[in-house]
Image (cartoon, rainbow, N blue to C red):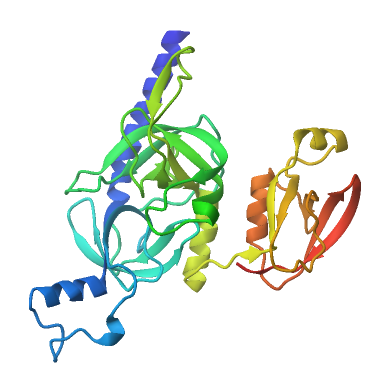
Amino acid sequence: MRAVGLLVAAAAVAAHAQDGKKLCRAIVQVQTTDRAAERAQLMQRGERTGASGRLPVAQLRIHQPYTMVVTGVCISEREILTPALHPRADLHVVVTYFDGRVAEASVKGTDPLSNLALLEVPADSPAFVPIHAAPVAMGDSIGIAGCPVQCHEGKSKFLNGRVRADQVAIGIEDIYGVAGDAGRIVLGTAFAVDTTEGRPNVGAACVDKEGRLVGLVVGGLPPRLVPDPDEPGRVRQIEMRFAVPAARIARIVDALRRDGRVVRADFGIALAPADEAVVAQFGLPPCAAAVTELARRPVRDGFQVHDVILAVDGETRRDAYELTEALSDKTPGKPVVFDVLRHGRRVTVTATPAER
């Protein structure tokens, strides 16, 4: 049986490696530079930046100019998904394909909360990876492809990884000027990726065995020791990387294509999965989420701390994290009906979200 298991594992690795060759054609290196920084460099070298040779006051920037290099993945013939673009800067974006071809790209939109951006290129990409919006499960084997920061022609790398966790709130350093409350980026149903072969870089694409995009790596945590699932009693060092799942990516991309930004609803409440004992006692759905905090501003819509939300507009969800994401997708200004458990009784609360 062990031999059969090894053969199956070897076949899976070989299949992923084959997919990796195809996938690497869709992986690009993305370099972004603040145009103000470029003009400032020209001035420092004494080069002329215009008819007067001076940098116009209107183009001076308050924030610190920067240049950044990350990985991107082509998701259609002329669209590239990438993380970590400054949402307020006037950017000059240059894309380098696997074959060394270089093209300038424009920014269609950015979403600071998920740390994602959508780019558009003028000519067709040599290959692209379709988004597959089905959820990934803990323990799934996936392929991970990306460009090292110092990328050269044909040097995209492909790793074999595994989904190590699901439904996590991500605590991550604010390395790209994008963070949630208290320095935490909460991505709802994000998943963690781990591999013993190397470290997936920011922007690396996660794909299933059919070569479809199931996530994009947006950050990670320092190395740590974890129990080895294959050898009980032993530990191994991993460098955890976190990815936004394709189901969330698909909704973000649709919004960026349509509006150039993602509009989210804010109900003025903080949620957490309901206590398991309460769920069991009252026979609540798996998505039951408890209100843990109310916004400091006056709350108009009648929520109370310890309320347990059971359904939204008559619909339940897979779990509390998916319910939280469903709330953020609601339309600001449009009333939403909640089924709520309060002090052991079921009540209805109607709430109108603001724009986040």
> 232 or 159: which is nearer to us?
232
Count up the numbered dots.
Answer: 0
> 233 or 204: which is nearer to us?
233
> 84 or 270: which is nearer to us?
270
Where is residue 118 shown, x and y percent of the image? 40, 63
Q: In this view, does 141 lie to the left or right of 314?
A: left
Residue 126 appears in the figure: no
Using the image, determine if residue 165 lies above or below residue 83: above
Residue ID at (80%, 59%)? 303
The quadrant of the rendering that contains the C terminus is bottom right
Where is residue 71 shown, x and y percent of the image? 31, 51
Outermost left residue: 46
Where is residue 63 shown, x and y percent of the image? 34, 70
> 321 or 260: which is nearer to us?
321
Query: Residue 276 lies in what quarter of the image?
Result: top right
Residue ID at (41%, 40%)? 221
Where is residue 82 shown, x and y percent of the image? 37, 56
Q: Is residue 26 left or right of residue 186?
A: left
Residue ID at (90%, 50%)? 346
Using the image, determine if residue 56 lies above or below residue 323: below
Q: In this view, does 304 lie to the left or right of 86?
A: right
Q: Is residue 238 left or right of residue 318?
A: left
